[in-house]
Image: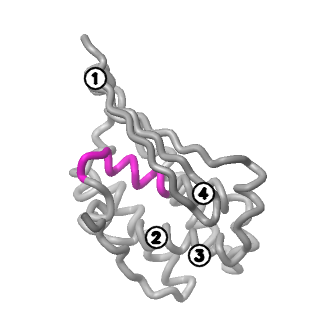
Amino acid sequence: MRWVVRMSRQVGHFGGVQVAHITAVSRIGRLLGGPPAIRVRILMDQHSRNNVMNTSQKRQAIVEALHLFAANGDVQLATLPPDIDRASELALQWDDVWVVVDKALPELFEDPEAVKAIIEINRKLDTLGDPGDQVWSDRAVLEMGAWEELRHLAREVLASLGVPRRDPPPLSH
């Protein structure tokens, strides 16, 4: 078997923190039953991650993530490039926000039920499946009950916060 690797690197900003996205795709990963893509995100340093975003920015970041997770499956997939593992990318986008807000949730939202539901979304994502499972496919995002449960929870949180639901914009080519 041969390794077929494609690497790409993008640098962007997330809440004022520089983020490097490095993607490596290997055919052997899929053949061995693992994920076809290995994606590494590097947040420049712990100090920056915790101190750059103020409370309002953290609240906005989680609300944006909730909008993405509340959207219908086809809308979720349309926000991402078709040549990546989009189900995994959805989870990674949540993780980008979670790493910044997890310990701050009680101070971000007064409603303890909203906080519990946000924590439940994170828990469900953590236990959704192992790399390579069918749950990490476009079809699963569109059809699996586990993804629909995540959408339902995200919609409930937005409603409890009094935030009108809106779909994230599709990826512009």
Q: CA distance from mark 3 to mark 1?
A: 39 Å
Q: Residue at x 56, y 67 (%)?
A: 117
The quadrant in which residue 146 appears is: bottom left
The residue where tag 3 is placed is 60
Picture quarter with the C terminus:
bottom left
Alpha carbon separation for disc pair 2 and 1: 37 Å
Q: Is residue 17 above or below residue 134?
A: below
Query: Principal SS element in the magenta part?
Result: helix
**Mark 2, residue position:** 154
The residue under label 3 is which amino acid type? Gln
Q: Are marks 4 and 3 in contact (CB under 8 Å)?
A: no
Per the rendered image, the range of residues in magenta is 82-93
Which of labels 1 and 4 is toward the front? Answer: 1
**Tag 4 secondary structure:** helix
Q: Choose top left, top right, bottom left or bottom right for residue 106.
A: bottom right
Which tag is nearer the camera, tag 3 or tag 1? 1
**Circles 4 and 2 in contact, beta carbons < 8 Å:** no
